[in-house]
Amino acid sequence: WARTLGLPAEAAAFAGVIAALCGWNIVHLKHLSLAAVAAWTPWLMAGIELALRGERTRPALRIGLAVGMMGLAGNPTALYYSLLVAAVNVTLGAILARHPRPIAIALRGLLLGLLLGAMQLAPTADFLGHSSRKVGLTFEQANSLGFHPKHLWMFVSPFAYGDPAHGTPYRGPEAFPD
C-alpha cells in the first residue's frame, strides 16, 4: 500500500515492518486467522487507492484477491472491520473526486472477492444460524460489559496485568464484575 501511495522502496519497507510489528498484530499472534486477515489489509487498501486514481482493471482484481483471501482466512469479524475501513476510504475518496467510478470498481472487486472466499464464507454464514450468539445482547447487557478505566493502561502494555496463556496469572481489576 505504501508503494501505491508513492513512497520510496525503503520507506515502504519500513512502513511494512511497522505495520507488521504494531501492538495489535503482536497481541493477536495467537489468533492466526486475525493475523491472516491483517496481512491482506494493505493489499485491499492499495486496490482502493488504485481505484481512486482512476485505474479500472487492476484495482478490482487486487481488491478481489485481498477480499477472497481474507474470507478464506476464516475470521469474518476482522474481514468486516477491514471492509468497513475500505468502504469509508473509497466513499470519501469518491466524494472528494466527485466521481462514483471508484465505488463501482470497489464493488466489482468485493463481488469477486466474495466469490473467491465463498467456500469459507458460505459455511460460516450457515453456522451463524446455529450459534448461541445469534440472539445477541440487550442494550443493558451490552453496556454492562465495560472495562474498568485501569484497563486503559493495557493499550500501552497489553500484558501489564499478566498473560495467563504463558503462565502469568491475571492480577488486574476485575474484568466483568457481577
Image (cartoon, helix red, strand yellow):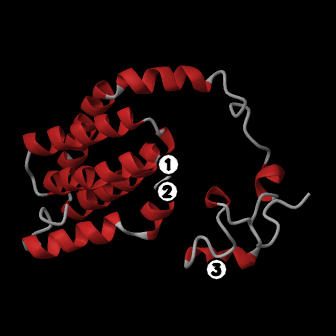
Q: Secondary structure at mark 3?
A: helix
Inspect the image, locate mark 3, and give the three-letter code of the amino acid beneath it: Trp
Depicted 86 relative to depicted 163: above or below: above
Marks 2 and 1 sit apart, C-alpha to C-alpha, by 5 Å
Q: Earlier in the sequence, mark 3 or mark 2?
A: 2
Which residue: 21% across, 74% down?
Answer: 14
How many residues crowd around disc 3 within 10 Å: few (fewer than 14), some, or many (20 or more)? Answer: few
How many residues crowd around disc 1 within 10 Å: few (fewer than 14), some, or many (20 or more)? Answer: few
Q: Nearer the viewer, mark 3 or mark 1?
A: 1
Asked whether 42 or 14 is in front, the reply is: 14
Residue where numbered disc 2 is placed? 28
Relative to 136, 8 lies left or right: left
Asked whether 50 or 14 is in front, the reply is: 14
Q: Are marks 3 and 1 in contact (CB under 8 Å)?
A: no
Depicted 122 relative to depicted 62: above or below: above
Q: Secondary structure at mark 2?
A: loop
Residue where numbered disc 3 is placed? 153
Which residue: 45% across, 21% down?
Answer: 122
Relative to 122, 42 lies left or right: left
Residue 56 image position (x, y, % from top left):
9, 43
Residue where numbered disc 1 is placed? 31
